[in-house]
Amino acid sequence: MGPGPPGGGRGSGRDRGRRGGVPRRGGGPPAVAREGGVRAVDLVTVTDLHRPRERADVHAALLAGAMPLAGGTALHGERHEHLAGLVDLVDLGWPDLEVLPDGDLRAAATASLRTVLDHPLTAPIRPFLHDTFSCLLASWKIWSRGTWGGNLCAALPAGAGTAAACTLGAVAEIWTPNGDTRTVPAAGFVNGPGTTVLAPGEVLRALRIPASSLTARYAVRRNSLVPSGRSASLVTGRLDPGGRCTLVVTAAVPAPEVLTWAVPPSPAEATEAVRALPHWYSDPQGDPRWRRHVAGLAAAAVTAELATTLAATRGEETR
């Protein structure tokens, strides 16, 4: 936030719990180690929970220093020493998923990953979503609470929700304080570990998935130092009906890297292109040189699988 039920940033449950006067979602207090008598996830400085009735209330609270709250799984995952307020986005009642007039699919930023995965509208891409979301290091509680939008906003290099959005060619819809909505490709939403393109007062409203991505084919390869550890390299691929191929590298790099070809490259070409990327991430999950190596191998495996899929599809069309 290894494999297991999907989970990400913030979930969409509407129930409330309170500990020490701090608003929190979920039933009981999370089981985490204490630090000096205070739980690491306690938001001990929070004094205000804003319940917006309209869009302007959200922007006003954010500009005043509040942070957005839906499920709160990312919010409670680290200390926020100077956070005084939260603004509850769930109260706005955004539809979890909806089909737009042009056939695109829109997923609200407050929709939990479990909801996205199980929703009838995502049936065509459910295997891909399952394989990708399962790369998140999360408990079953995070599966039901974490949101796709929250996973993007957390901007973790190993954020599998980010990988899924980039691979699908999704577009982030962002509400701005002046009342406008601007769009940013998901591939450009995260610009580094813990940082996004969101400006002060802005909030992620939804992810828009192109209709064409619902008929594409996908492949996923993940590497970690241990079987159930955090992803050290995640390479995902999309093959469009016309043959266009997209590879996305996450976890091994500071921010998502997207590579495209008019037709699927050979495994050797994919490996070379991935290993030519300029920046590789370094943390306890893996040395940058090792990550570069395994990401190249994963790219070869992904493109080989997609090429096999393309050949099989064309064979069926000629029968």
Image (cartoon, rainbow, N blue to C red):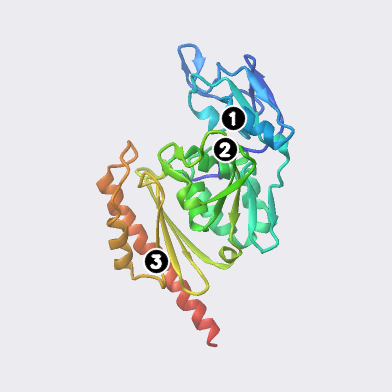
Q: Is residue 135 visible?
A: no
Q: Which numbered disc flags the more N-terminal residue, 2 or 1?
A: 1
Q: Viewer-proximal residue, 106 or 221?
A: 106
Q: Secondary structure at mark 3?
A: helix
Secondary structure of residue under mark 2: loop
In the picture, the disc for residue 303 is 3
Residue under pointer 1: 62
Q: Nearer the viewer, residue 110 or 234?
A: 110
Q: Which residue is mark 2?
A: 202
Q: To which quarter of the image does residue 262 belong?
A: bottom left
Q: Disc 2, disc 1: CB below 8 Å?
A: yes
Graded by Cα atoms within 10 Å as few (under 14), some (14 to 19) or many (20 or more), the crowding at tag 2 reads many
Front disc: 3 or 2: 2
Query: How far across and down, in percent of the image, does residue 188 sit?
Result: 46, 50
Q: Residues within 10 Å of mark 3 (few under 14, many from 20)?
A: many
Q: Tell me: 241 left or right of 206.
A: left
- The residue mark sitting in front, 1 or 3, is 1
SS category of the residue bearing label 1: helix
**Mark 1 burial class by Cα count in 10 Å: few <14, some 14-19, many 20+:** many
